[in-house]
Amino acid sequence: MIFTETLTKKFSSITAVAGVSLQVQQGDIFGLVGPDGAGKTTLIRMLCGLITPDSGSITMVDNAASGESSASFGYMPQKFSLYGDLTVMENINFFGAMYGLNGTIINQRADEILQITNLFRFKQRFADNLSGGMKQKLALTCALLARPRLLVLDEPTFGVDPESRKEFWKILYQLNQEGMTILVSTPYMDEAELCKRVGFMNNGRLVVVDSPKNMKSRYPYRILEIKCASRQPEIFQGLPEILESNFYGDKYRLVVQEAKIAEAAVVEFLQGRDIPLYRLKETKPTMEDVFVALAEKEVVEWSMSSQPVN
């Protein structure tokens, strides 16, 4: 569906995208993740023809088997770009006309999509009066009017509340099941978990592409989860057996090299300070753990060829 070869873009002395070769297959939900400034938005804008690459090539095809080129796609930018002083339906009519659709087709498709996005009863509401999640659904509705085979979304749920994000992803899954290919960039690792394949970008480079399951299986460290009487976020930092320590709510999440050795060290450490230990167990890595390891690749040695953790 999308094929790029050594795609590169520079802004003055800054290389935003450095030699990215990417394939998004038909039927994919492909997630593009990485830290701020990694080059995700620049890459997406090049794919959509909004920015001209300095070098490399982009091929977009409707059918990889036939090689038919010039795929139809819908694009939803990072920031809400519709008109706040127009109603939901007025925005839809405007963008439908931009796609060259007549009024009958616009109304028919709008009714179908608004039912899917749960915006049907808000047709006459001004866009400025919609919630953040509803604005994103309106932007998605406009992107879907032309019935594209490919949907490209740049951080579509950024700043949206968790419940609205869940609803948005239910819609994406429904569209994918109906045959639509989806390329989405996201800053949220729980959303990366929902993708069929994930590409991690850092410093303009595409570091790795794989399924979330494979990425987690190749995570080179062990994770310990601890609940104890302490609420000091940095209490375990400095222990030689602990590579990284994080405190979430009422539990600690420790990154370690050897689980058994680290468990013994933690127990001894807490006993020496008379801190009751409520729970200590090994748990599976998440995409957040993978993200951190990849983002710190320069200081934390990472090998995607390492053996999966049993």
Image (tube, rainbow, N blue to C red):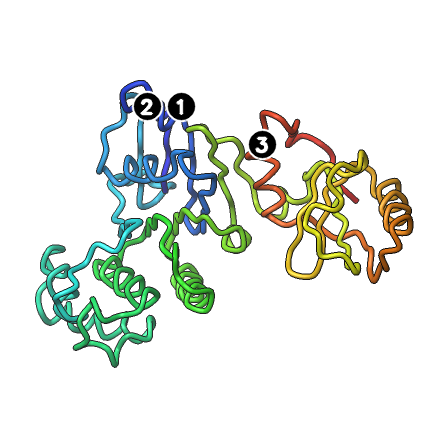
Question: Where is mark 3, residue-wise?
Answer: 296
Element type where label 1 sits in the image: strand
In the rendered image, which quarter is residue 289 located in? top right
Write down the quadrant of residue 220 in the picture: top right
Q: Residues within 10 Å of mark 2 (few under 14, many from 20)?
A: some
Q: Are marks 2 and 1 in contact (CB under 8 Å)?
A: yes
Q: Quadrant of the N terminus?
A: top left
Q: Residue at x 79, y 51 (%)?
A: 282
- 124 or 174: nearer the eye? 124
Q: Residue at x 26, y 70 (%)?
A: 130
Mark 2 falls on what kind of element?
A: strand
Specify which label sits upstream in the sequence, 3 or 1. 1
When the figure is inspected, residue 301 is found, relative to residue 289, above or below; the finding is above
Residue 55, numbered circle: none
- The amino acid at mark 1 is Gly
| Residue highlighted by disc 2 | 56
Residue 68 lies, in percent from the top left, at 28, 40
- Work out how far the residue at label 2 is from the one at label 1, CA to CA, in angstroms: 7 Å
Quadrant holding the C terminus: top right
> For the residue marked with disc 3, what is the amino acid?
Glu
Locate residue 194, reporting x and y percent: 52, 56
